[in-house]
Image: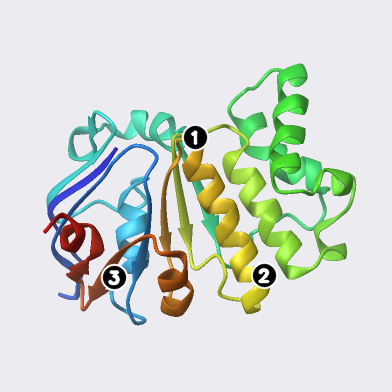
């Protein structure tokens, strides 16, 4: 579902954020990107929805090689990718329902279908009772779950998360990660960047470790060997 083949990313000024990165994720697989700050985790995630383009190598999502994708087709690619961030990025002047509905509205989802999808997404993250509330009235963990509901409301086949538990305590972090595992079990290919190595090890899922832009370990390769 996601394939990197010899991918490198060099920024103006010469900084090479990624070097010869190669890995493959199957449909419905859950994997974690780990590594210290500056290792290249966020850059790697940004290549998948074409928020950045690689300098060298190939990135393939589904049957689409992103290097050959024209600018006008990028919005279609992004509609199939849910993105979750550490800082939630919720609109404080809109209700929980409206925040989750926003990407569906942009995609032109019919109103009757929109309501059904938003409520189904909120139900999955156990926040349906808060659909009329405003984000500032919710806890940090609840706000992060709203962000997850917004990312999955359109039923994307790919879900990306960049440090989604960075501001949460261990108990809430475990709850959020359990949500991601549930989406993976439903067939969503899920890739999560996190610095919480201890939590990843407890979950026992695939771990791709980055250091200075290079993959230094991939537990899937160790298990295959």
Q: Is 6 on the left-hand or right-hand side of 59?
A: left
Q: Is 111 on the left-hand or right-hand side of 185?
A: right
Q: Is residue 77 visible?
A: yes
Q: Is 187 on the left-hand or right-hand side of 117?
A: left
Q: Mark 3 — residue? A: 40
Seen as rendered, the residue at the extreme bottom is 36
Q: Mark 2 — residue? A: 172
Query: In the depicted view, which residue is nearer to us: 4 or 43?
Result: 4
Q: How far apart in space, not on screen, are marks 3 and 2 (Cα)?
A: 26 Å
Query: In the depicted view, which residue is nearer to us: 210 or 199?
Result: 199
Looking at the image, tell me whether mark 1 or mark 2 is earlier in sequence order: 1
Q: How far apart in space, not on screen, are marks 1 and 2 (Cα)?
A: 24 Å
Picture layout, residue 118 above or below residue 99:
above
Q: Secondary structure at mark 1?
A: loop
Contact (Cβ within 8 Å) of mark 1 with mark 3: no
Q: Mark 1 — residue? A: 156
Where does the C terminus fall, quadrant-wise?
bottom left
Picture layout, residue 150 above or below residue 162:
above
| Position in image of residue 197 (x %, y %) | 41, 77
| Residue at the image point whose x is 61% and y is 37% from the top | 103
Query: Closer to the observer: label 1 or label 3?
Result: 1
| Residue at the image point whose x is 58% and y is 32% from the top | 154
| Residue at the image point whose x is 71% and y is 66% from the top | 141
Looking at the image, tell me whether mark 3 or mark 2 is earlier in sequence order: 3
Looking at the image, tell me whether mark 1 or mark 3 is earlier in sequence order: 3
Q: How far apart in space, not on screen, are marks 1 and 3 (Cα)?
A: 24 Å
């Amino acid at each position: 579902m996601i394939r990197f083949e010899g991918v490198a990313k060099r920024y103006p000024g010469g900084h090479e954020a990624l070097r010869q990165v190669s890995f493959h994720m199957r449909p419905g697989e859950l994997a974690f990107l780990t590594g210290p700050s500056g290792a290249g985790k966020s850059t790697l995630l940004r290549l998948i929805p074409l928020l950045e383009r690689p300098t060298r190598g190939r990135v393939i999502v589904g049957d689409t090689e992103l290097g050959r994708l024209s600018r006008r087709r990028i919005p279609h690619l992004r509609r199939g990718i849910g993105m979750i961030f550490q800082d939630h990025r919720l609109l404080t002047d809109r209700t929980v329902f409206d925040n989750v509905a926003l990407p569906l509205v942009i995609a032109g989802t019919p109103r009757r279908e929109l309501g059904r999808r938003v409520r189904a997404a909120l139900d999955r993250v156990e926040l349906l009772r808060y659909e009329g509330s405003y984000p500032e009235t919710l806890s940090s963990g609840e706000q992060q779950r709203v962000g997850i509901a917004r990312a999955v409301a359109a039923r994307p086949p790919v879900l990306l998360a960049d440090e989604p538990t960075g501001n949460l305590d261990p108990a809430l972090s475990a709850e959020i990660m359990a949500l991601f595992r549930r989406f993976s079990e439903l067939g969503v290919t899920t890739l999560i960047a996190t610095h919480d190595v201890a939590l990843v090890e407890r979950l026992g899922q695939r771990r791709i470790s980055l250091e200075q832009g290079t993959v230094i370990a991939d537990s899937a390769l160790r298990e295959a060997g």
